[in-house]
Image (cartoon, rainbow, N blue to C red):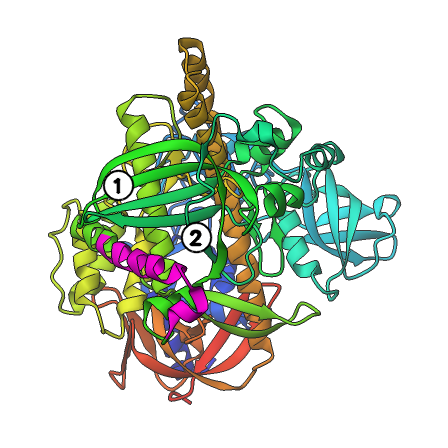
Amino acid sequence: MKPKQLKKRKKYIYDVICTKDYQPMRAREIAILLQIPKEKRRDLQDTLDSLLQDGKVAMDKRGRYYKAPAGKAGRPSAKRGKERRADAIRGVYVGHPRGFGFVEVEGEEEDYFIPGEYTNGAFHMDTVEILPLPAGSGKRREARVAAILEHGITEVVGTFEQGRAFGFVKSDNSRVCRDIFIPQKDAGGARDGQKVVVKLTDYGGHHRSPEGKVTEILGDSRDPGVDVLSVARGMGLPMEFPERVLNQARRVAETVSEADRNGREDLRDVLMVTIDGEDAKDLDDAVSLTVEDGVYHLGVHIADVSNYVQAGSALDREAFKRGTSVYLVDRVLPMLPVQLSNGICSLNAGEDRLALSCLMDMDASGRVIAHSIVESVIRVDRRMSYTEVNRILTGQDEDPARDCGSLAPMLKAMGELSARIRSRRSGRGSIDFDFPECRIILSATGHPIEIKPHERNAATDLIEDFMLSANETVAREFCEREIPFVYRTHENPDRDRMEGALHFIHTLGIRTAKAGQEMSSGEVQEILDKLKGNPCEELVSRLLLRSMKQAKYTTACTGHFGLAAKYYCHFTSPIRRYPDLQIHRIIKDSIRGRLKPEKIAWYAEHLDEVAAQSSVTERRAQEAERETDKMKMAEYMSYHLEEVFAGRISGVTAWGIFVELPNTVEGMIRLADMVDDYYRFDEEQYQVVGEHSGRTYRLGDPVRVRVKGADAAAKTIDFSLVDGE
């Protein structure tokens, strides 16, 4: 390696090691992190050796490189102190593609780092016992796996690779970093390159591959839909309903009987509509509105799914297991069979349907001044789409009465009430993250042909405002009555997790709260308001959102930070969310006078499990949706290699610059590939700086990029800067 080239590489590697996000790594791990090909890793080792000799980096006893402390350098002494033992700690092992892992311990925010040589053969998601290691130079706690108590994964989805007398399966889940050995007799007829499901028969050890048996062949990896199916199966999403569940669904009546109507409030003469996307099939909410003496009488009518899914039934057990419907890029995995979700439980126009109706009286400011929750029978007058309602609300439809008849005045009044509700919610500090979601359009063969933002409009805002009002009203009643319930809660953000985002916002000239102080939702919204019209508006919104804690389901009514709501639950989607279905049962027990002490005690005992399961399945669904979207985005960009696009910088790190295109696709420019200058990450100013040119790249900057690579299997997209070529 030439001296000039070595000097440049030393600067690059040293800057990476000095960043605050860097954890001590071995040479192989650094190579993987920086995606240095095997044929160039000798150069990396020479660079690291030179840095060691210069005293800029040090290496610990496990061969990991870190920034040398002041006055110390080079390799550590071979002498080792006696390891300090501690009581074994129980947790869940989370694997990493680079061979090391982490152990998550319940009740502790910080996990334990497990170096590769101390995993003791642990498999991703195993329940393990660990012993802490002596404090080292790293920033996080370290431990070794002392015992494997229970395996958390029994199946692996991956690609079958045929050998001469045996096969291997390479897992789609990069956290399962070891290939699965498949004896010839257990290959199940799988052919090279096919996607398969493998049942693990032996989990292997530190120096021995795990073994398995092919139990299902999903198809060739190039067949339409197999890629998405593989992601879904790999995440343990239920694909098919058991026959007993389908049989129970088939036995449900297709129409509302007279017996079903008995004891319910008859609202069939009330003018009401459903407002959904054009392709929606499970319509679980309808809205109605009248105005009298300045009081808005808003009705939010939700399908009474609990009338058809009895607690403890096969249908209920399957719904609890699934927790939520999952909306993948090419299919929906419903929580309930379509006979229910698209049939008797769907509020189809012109059909009698059973509902739970939250009837709210609101004053001119959008404040609920009175309400009631009733079992009802309804008949929707018309199914409407977001597009046509938006045209009416925004004045694009010149004669709405011509198209909507008597519905037009109600829709106009709904628009007025929606604006007042939204203004009131904004006034109390509710956060409004206004950025588009992506919409991926596939061909008949499952290939992405277009990706575009899915914009919100006045109609989507209207439905959101009405549903939030109903959710808050229901939650408030049952919290104040101290009845066991399932709430949707969102904790205040951890100030430390917000520091990075707030530091960057400060560099934009926007004043934020002092370091170490807890933020209110109003302060977050104030930042977003100041960013209106700024090129960084959408990107900072995402940055703030990612810095916050996840919302979850709990039995304690602790409020919702993002909505600035003291009371909140999910009441409005029982077709696709189990918590909504569960609280419908509680509400009906209350209405019918069945909340006796023993019933209340039963709910108090069982609802924690409902909340926990619902939170877990929701996160699983979100991850599956994100992963299939990323996969199809990468596939789409693979059809556009070497093409140039305009975008904005959406993130900066020590190893690359992330750029988001207008269609929401995001890719990375690797600093090592920017050959026109030596670039480093400036943590203080949250930017990448060219050492010789002084050129800077900051969040929100417009850039032009060329698509250099896209890997659908790895779900990655690589860009290069056009201006830097």
Q: Cβ–Cβ below 8 Å for labels 1 and 2?
A: no
- Report whether residue 176 is seen: yes
Front tag of 1 and 2: 1
The percent position of residue 663, horizontal first and vertical second, equals 45, 74
Dot 2 surroundings within 10 Å: few (below 14), some, or many (20 or more)?
many
Q: Amino acid at mark 1?
A: Asp
Is residue 31 depicted above or below 133 in this figure?
below
**Residue behind mark 2:** 64
- Secondary structure at badge 2 equals loop
The percent position of residue 710, horizontal first and vertical second, equals 56, 73
Looking at the image, which residue is at 39% across and 68% down? 401
**Picture quarter containing residue 680?**
bottom left
Is residue 549 depicted above or below 587 in this figure?
below
Quadrant containing the C terminus in the rendered view = bottom left
Which residues lie in the magenta part? 399-420
The percent position of residue 308, horizontal first and vertical second, equals 59, 32
Q: Main secondary structure of the magenta part?
A: helix
Looking at the image, which residue is at 45% across and 38% down? 615
- Secondary structure at badge 1 equals strand
User: Is residue 402 left or right of 332 when viewed as pictured?
Assistant: left
Q: Is residue 542 magenta?
A: no
Is residue 129 depicted above or below 440 in this figure?
above
Q: Nearer the viewer, residue 703 or 455?
A: 455
**Residue behind mark 1:** 361
**Picture quarter containing residue 142?**
top left
The percent position of residue 265, horizontal first and vertical second, equals 44, 32
